[in-house]
Amino acid sequence: VSSNNKNKIALEGVTYFSPKAESHAGYCHGGSMCSVFDDVIGWCGFLSNGQGKVLPWSGFTAQIDTALKKPVRVGSVLLIRARIVGKVRRKVFIEAELVDPSSSSSCSSKEEDDEEDVVVYATAKGLFLLNKGI
């Protein structure tokens, strides 16, 4: 977990795509990438409560729009990162990306990385809804 200079919450982690994620010979099923996005967007949402701590089950992911940009080979270890980009009352807007960790700096925004050098496998935009009263 980190906060950048604009006090935005960001999460990042490493994800491994095992042979159980395989779809076409040697490549991961797109659903496995979507599942990882669902998880990281949800956890980012759990941090959005304004209390400075994680509140699991304080809301839910209502929508995810995923763009699969490059095939992911089975056995790949990639960096997933997500950040809150906006909040309106109970609605939390989150963006995430799945990138090659050797081509990206840690917990950075797209503006901080040289976009030509970053290998992006997939991106996602999510809408997380906080429960009433949070």
Image (cartoon, helix red, strand yellow):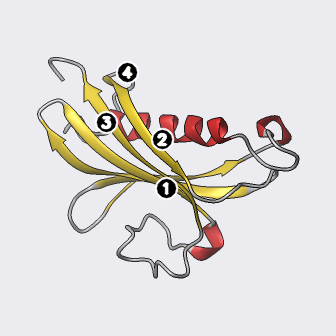
Tags 2 and 1 touching, CB below 8 Å: no
Label 4, residues with CA under 10 Å away: few <14, some 14-19, many ≥20? few
Q: Nearer the viewer, mark 1 or mark 4?
A: 1
Q: Nearer the viewer, residue 13 or 37?
A: 37
Q: Where is residue 75 in the image (x, y as percent from the top left)?
A: 82, 52
Residue highlighted by disc 1:
97
Residue highlighted by disc 2:
40
Q: Nearer the viewer, mark 3 or mark 2?
A: 3
Q: Which of marks 3 and 4 is in front?
A: 3
In screen coordinates, is 84 left or right of 110?
A: left
Q: Which of marks 3 and 4 is nearer the N terminus?
A: 4
Q: Which of marks 3 and 2 is nearer the N terminus?
A: 2
**Amino acid type of the residue tagged 2 in the rendering:** Val
Q: Position of residue 112 (x, y in %)?
A: 38, 77
Residue displayed at 17% across by 17% down? 132
The residue sitting at the right extreme is 25
Q: Position of residue 54 (x, y in %)?
A: 35, 34
